[in-house]
Amino acid sequence: MGKFSVPEEIRKLKPEGSIVKRFHDKFYVYEWTGVWSKEDKKSKAKSGKLIGKITLEDGFIRNGTELTEEKILIKEYGTYSMLENLCSDILGYLKLCFDIETANTIFSLACINFTEGLTALKNYKKIYDYSYLSERFPNIHISKNTLSLFLEDLGSKLNPTYKFYDLMIEKSSKNYAIDGHVIPSFSKENDLTKFGNKYSKIDSKQMNLLALFDVITKQPIMSKIYDGSQLDKTSVKEFLTLRPIENTLIIMDSGFFSKENIELFSTNSNSYIIPLSENYIDYKEAVKELKYDGDFVYESCEKDKKLINYYIHKQSSGVSIYVFQDKQLADKLKIEYLSCIKNNIKGYSDEKLKEIEKTLGVIVLQTNSESLTFKEIFEFYKKRWGIETYFNGVKNSLDFTALGLQNYYEIQGLVLILQITGMMWQQVIATSKKSIKKFSIKDVITETRFIKILKLYNEWKVTNMSANVTENLKDYKVSKIFKTNCGLAAVTI
């Protein structure tokens, strides 16, 4: 053993965030912090003040008698263990595209967002310190200033992010929904905060989030924030050229319709499905005479089956227009309309009902696909609802109005973290659907948060893991951990 080497049994006794230095036969402990280097794109370790010493007899002995900066002996565990195990593939994808420390940092930040909701930069470090993440990923650095530089780097040096998007595209089903989501913003300095088309509804300026979503795997594929003054039908022209997208099906709502966008959606052997708005000429022509050619049964789930009427209005120049009517929905809408007439609600009348009755429950879809049947076209369009569910999670779980970020690049960097969080949501939801014990996201967080890890005699142990909790969570892959000579190991309960 060298003159200055530190034995393994001594290193095991040092507190988190410190380094041991040997002088003769004594071992002294110094603060050891990471400082993010914007130039080198990595954290650099920096030694700080002397905080104590270590002996085999007494372990770590802190200088003086202060009670500050004591070791945290109980940490949040259950939710983070679940995410580590259920979403190990996501961490693996990140490690293929980013360096190890960056991948671990992105994954940890997404775990915190999943558990706590969107978190202010100043609070990430404290949450990390009090969680299993600080044991699992002890070498990441997410203090407020370091994290700000990290996000700025992530949002400006895009090659690794683009590599990640390419990997997601490669692993996808190639059947996408694309849509935008308005994010209210009260920031005065943010370059992306503008007056937008939803100002009258949200009573604030806005940013616009565009996302590409796989309707089969239910995973977000690519995301970007645009300034609130841009319409989605304008932003999508740049968004769909961020990465090569070819031989795919793209499903969208009527707000994306324009001649230029139809040409864009048709390039690179791509197919599209888009509904026509009631004010379009082709829509009005399609519903003049509704003589249906036939019907089919649409199954949105095991207990929900509907009879759908259909007919082909037009097929020419590689474009087809299909008309569908959901008869059950039409009857429901008619009953609701008659109720409004009965209650003398302004704007509802028998004369108006006669005008619109035949188009109740009707949807007109335009597509350039020559391989899909009329039933498949309808079914794929209905799958677009998955992206609405995803955005609903963004709205309810992550409050961008509390973000407090001003820097354009920091916000774009955070969008990737948001996407990873969304991928975690989808995987937990998928697990719940297959599990005997079905939990909502909120409920599974509540259930797993009871599980902590407690440090006793320098070894972490799981606590609050009752038989009932174990039974409820057996499909959610929360693990039992133990200490080994090589560090932490995990065994699923």
Image (cartoon, helix red, strand yellow):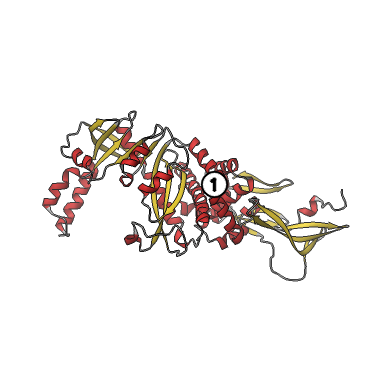
In what quadrant of the picture does the C terminus appear? top right
Viewer-nearest residue: 438 or 264 = 264
Q: Residue at x 23, y 44 (%)?
A: 280
Q: Position of residue 20 (x, y in %)?
A: 78, 57
Residue lying furthest top in this view?
371
Residue furthest to the left in view is 351
**Position in image of residue 218 (x %, y %):** 44, 42
Q: Is residue 436 visible?
A: no
Q: Front-most of 463 and 317?
A: 317
* Placement of 411 over or under 260, stated as above or below: below
User: Looking at the rendering, which quadrant does residue 126 occupy?
Assistant: bottom right
- The structure residue drawn at horizontal position 63% and vertical position 54%, both measured from the top left corner, is 38
Left or right of 153 on screen, residue 274: left
Identify the residue at horizontal 21%, vertical 42% (top origin). Answer: 281
377 horizontally vs 359: left or right: right
- Which amino acid type is shown beneath numbered disc 1? Leu
Residue with the most extreme front position: 260
Residue 34 spot, x, y in % from top left = 68, 57
Q: How many marks?
A: 1
Residue carrying label 1: 158
- SS type, badge 1: loop
